Each structure stands twice: as structure tokens, then as C-alpha cells.
Image (spheres, rainbow, N blue to C red):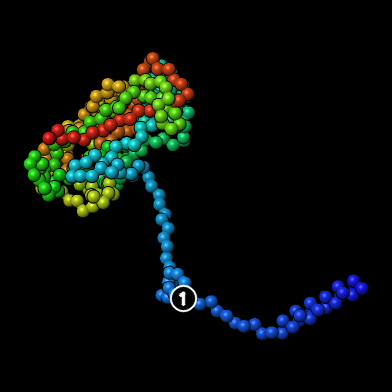
Amino acid sequence: MKLTKIASLALASATVLGTLALVAPVATNAATQEGNATANNGIALPQTDQTTAGISFGEPNPNGNTGYLRLQKVPEILDFGNHETFNTSYPTFTADGKNSYNDTNNRYPNYKSGDTNMTAILNTQDQKLQDVNGKAWVTVVDKQDSRTDATAPNTNSNGTWQLSVKADGPLQKVNELGEAAGSTTDALLSFANTAYGRTTAVYDLTAESQDDGYTPAAATETDVSAITKDFNVNVNTNSTAVQVAAAADGEGTGANVFGWDKSDIKLTLPSTFTAENAIYETTLTWTLATGIN
């Protein structure tokens, strides 16, 4: 009896399928009218969206300073690398992450144990800046000649400024959050063979909207004359500012770039230093000032 019921169900199913196969399909086409938000129950077609594709080189981020005269760029990081140990016979390290004259002591070119050295260099096609191309750099932008409110003691003449740098304290052992975590040490930071370049194509260099359209008003242009070729910064609690450059009245129109090869920026540790398995950091403060009150 059960076998009969199963056979009957199978036959009935076959009959139904056979009947459906004889019904002609109804042709349909999808259609939503463009320009009709109601028909689309939302935003009218056509609809668009955008994707940003980007790549960068070097260190393009500006620091946010504005003004006719501004400190536009300083190195975000000077990276002296990660090393096996400290040997008092080789106390000097360079900003390309190397221990001078002691290559076997170099573990990583990055002081946080990464494979890429973080001391950025300038990449530019401006022929007036070729002496600083490929170097760690500082930029001072001088557009005082574009000042429209030259009320005394302010003028619309370029120049009359000084660039200096100091350490904000000794090298400090830090934890993974960059917080102070113990010992400190004094050190000496040296910059050698300061290179210089100046361009009035400021926007091409900075890519900052505040520089777009700038052209010098002065009939003649003069480079900055007082540039410190070699200087040392004491990395300690009593560090004092060291002059990097000074522009006299009428000098420095446009973007003034000061640069150093990574190998010419050196950190020398004292013979009394005892290395721990740790990161040591300090900060430098670069100052652009005029001394005019």
C-alpha cells in the first residue's frame, strides 16, 4: 500500500511539471528612468561616486604655519638607527641609521627596528634647488613683499630674520608610547656642510594653497648671506639656540631651503653612556624670528 502511494505522488508531480512546461514565458525588461528620483525611490540616476588613488614620496606634510614669513618645514624625524650595542670606540651615529666606522653594529636603519630609515629627504625638480635636492631639509618662506598692510614697524621688504635650533632636553629612554621610562643621557648633535637653495616658485615646492599665485614684487632678488656651514647642538637640559642662518634686509625672497646629507647629521654619545635595550628620544625646536617688537 505504501509503495502505491509513493508511485502515485511521483506520477502526479510529473503531470504538474508537464503542464507548466506548456505555458509560454512572459518577456520582461528591467527599466528605471534617469532623472526621476521618485521612480528610483531614492536619488535619481545616473549616480556617481569617487575613489582617491594616491602615492607619496619623501615627507610632504606641511606643519600648518601661515604668514608672509613662516617656518614652512623642518625634519619630522632624525633617525639614527637601531644597533647591537654601544662601543665607546665608535660613539658617533649618522641620520641614515649607521654607526660610523662600525658597520657590524648596525641592526636596522630605523631606530624603531624597521627596515626603512625615517630621515626624509627633499625631492624636487627645481633647478634652483639642486644643491639641496636629496638632503634632509628646512624651509623658510619669505613673502613679506606681498604684505598689503605694511604698518610700522612692519614693512613689505623681505629679509631681516634668523633661523635657529636647540634641543629640548637630553636623550630620554621611552616606552612604546613615547613616554619617559627611566634613564637619560646628554649627547652632541652636529650638522656639517649646510647646503642652500632659494626659489621664487614657492607653490611648486610647498604645494600649499597659501602660496598659490605668489610672484616676487622685488625687482632684484638676493640670497641669504649668513649661513652657518657647520654647527653643534648640545643635547642636554641646558641646550641653547644655535643660529643656522640669518637674512639681512632685502634677502631671502621666496622659499629658502637649507639641507644636509644624512651622513652629515651626526649624534655622538658620551663615553659614560650605558646602553639598555631601549629607545632614546629627544626633540629639537627650530625657531624663525625677526627680533622686531
Farthest top residue in view: 272
Q: Is residue 131 visible?
A: no
Residue 130: give x, y in percent of width and height: 27, 41
Query: Is 13 placed above or below 181 here?
Result: below
The residue lying at 23 percent from left, 52 percent from top is 212
**Label 1: how many residues lie within 10 Å, few (<14), some (14-19) or many (20+)?**
some
Farthest left residue in view: 152
Farthest right residue in view: 1
Q: Is residue 102 visible?
A: yes
The residue lying at 38 percent from left, 21 percent from top is 184
Q: Quadrant of the C terminus?
A: top left
Q: Which residue is mark 1?
A: 39
The residue lying at 44 percent from left, 28 percent from top is 175
Query: Is 78 placed above or below 62 here?
Result: above
SS for callout 1: helix
Instruction: Name which quarter of the figure residue 236 lies in.
Output: top left
Q: In terms of depth relative to the viewer, which is nearer, 273 or 12?
A: 12
Residue 121: give x, y in percent of width and height: 34, 39
On the picture, is 77 further left or further right than 107?
A: left
The residue lying at 17 percent from left, 40 percent from top is 252
On the picture, is 4 further left or further right than 78?
A: right
Residue 1: give x, y in percent of width and height: 92, 73
User: How many numbered discs, if any?
Assistant: 1
Query: Is 149 placed above or below 90 here?
Result: below
Q: In terms of depth relative to the viewer, which is nearer, 254 or 181?
A: 181
Q: In terms of depth relative to the viewer, which is nearer, 104 or 32?
A: 32
Residue 265: give x, y in percent of width and height: 32, 29
On the picture, is 143 further left or further right than 84?
A: left
On the picture, is 2 further left or further right than 81?
A: right
| Amino acid residing under circle 1 | Ala
